[in-house]
Amino acid sequence: MSISRRQVLLIGGLGVLGAGGTMLPMGSVEAKSASRISPNDMPKPFQAAFVQAPVLQPYAAGTDPVDGLPVNYYKLTQKAAMASILPRLGTPILGYNGLFPGPTISLDQGTKAVLRIRNQLPAEHALDGHALSTSTHLHGSASKPQFDGYASDITHPGFYKDYHYPNFQPARTLWYHDHGVHFTALNAYSGLAAQYHLHDPVERQVLPQGNFDVALTISDAMFAADGSLGFDDNSHSGLWGDVILVNGRPWPVMKVQKRVYRFRILNCSISRSLRPTLSTGDPVVVVGTDGGLVPVAQPVDSWRHAGAERYEVLVDFRKYKAGQRIELRNLSNKNNVDYDFTNKIMAFDVTDEPVDASDPTWNRIPTTLASSEAMSLQPGQSVKTRKFRVKRSDSTNMWTINDDSWQDVIASGYKKVIADPDLNSVEIWEIENKSSGWFHPLHIHLVDFQILSRNGAPPLAHERGPKDVVYVGEGETVRLLMKFTPNTGLYMMHCHNLPHEDHDMMAQFRVGLKESDWDPDDPMTAARAAWDDDPA
């Protein structure tokens, strides 16, 4: 596929910004800025208006001939585009339908989805020349392996792939993002990320809906002098930008009524972790984690929020005066790189707009919500305990899990696994991080898990719900309890500091099959991409 001059211009500005050092961070690091744009072009906090991503509508609906369940059909096109992030300069991005974040997909439990992802990206990334092949992962979905965004199952420019999503799980905030092998960080950082909401009757009844169910996709970025995205991953250790974006806008301001709002907060930064808190000191109430509703609501003053984690929180604006501004701030965590304004996320301006008191969620702060299979598991059900250590290899300078990497998986012909649980078995996985200089958000595909302990103590208040990403902090050991259901086959486990994943902190496990068994859902062969003969 040839690259048009327009495509080259759209993505051509993305540049490398050397930080003058490598292997950051070690300890708490602060600096004034990372971007190379002039002060006149640098965005200032609380100048941009808050916006939400558009909701993607299905182009068709039908019925699954096998089980009779409804199916929605969607199309998304990955393409280069320009975004208006900075006050005066345009920023080239890669986006789903040319947007960052991409369109939100919202549907009900029990309605399946078929999502056609069309790769109309330039053939190569202008920054480093890597092929812009992609693999789309619906993060939080118990998809079959061939539709799970297996890193090496890539779709080349000019091709498309249909992803089938079962949507049988309880209500939750999922997100879809690029998972292309060895280039996930740069592709996701360039804009290939978006939210996906699954609803069910319990969640519909107890939590705010519609305009009061608000998606916040938070990321950070740095900018080259021409307004393009800058990229510096500090020798594959991580990227920390000096501009905080919410739904693609720098430090935006949202107008809110004097009522209870629900915020679905996704940290889609490729490395930065957050510690959000309200400027008033008032607590927020955590009602959902990665895998859906928590059994018991958890009031917290702040919470530790790593890349790829999702937390659903309620904020009660009833107590504030019209005209009052409340900031959502960032207290940060150990081993981030912080800049002048990375301590701010966004602001809320309270209005005197009349509240619809007929909506029962306007003043409701539930205490008991819903249990789940993951949170109902008991340690006594576990048939095996496995131990994993996450670290940087001294010999190869690569990030590894038990000294294994995705290079090892590729070299084995995609056969090598770090675990082989039986289908429907329950196991405890213990993950140890002895490093003092790095934290690792570990994502385990397919399953929701329960965090049993952190360094022998109970899990933190905000993480007492079903999870699929666990923050493994410096010097921490976490114990996780999970059931390997409902699918057999190969699934990935990796760090969601994406430069770590790409170099090469990703391994795989095999559920319910032996290495010699025929796998009808092999992620590399069972559902191949097809040539897109309608590129319009």
Image: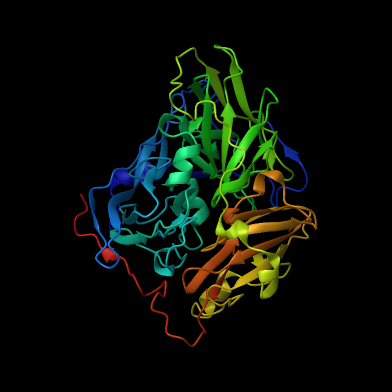
Q: Position of residue 258 (x, y in %)?
A: 53, 19
Nearer the observer, 49 or 155: 49
- Residue at x 56% of width, y 59% of height: 373
Q: Position of residue 282 (x, y in %)?
A: 68, 26
* Corner quadrant of residue 298: top right
Q: Position of residue 29 (x, y in %)?
A: 74, 40
- Residue at x 24% of width, y 65% of height: 65
Nearer the observer, 377 or 172: 377
Nearer the observer, 112 or 408: 112
Nearer the observer, 324 or 400: 324
- Residue at x 41% of width, y 39% of height: 92
Q: Is residue 304 visible?
A: yes
Q: How many marks?
A: 0
Q: How is the image coloured?
A: rainbow
* Corner quadrant of residue 454: bottom right
* Corner quadrant of residue 113: bottom left
Looking at the picture, does residue 526 appear above or below residue 320?
below
Looking at the picture, does residue 161 appear above or below residue 211?
below
Looking at the picture, does residue 461 appear above or below residue 135?
above
Q: Quadrant of the N terminus?
A: bottom left
Q: Is residue 224 visible?
A: no
Q: Position of residue 324 (x, y in %)?
A: 59, 14
The outermost residue toward the bottom is 516
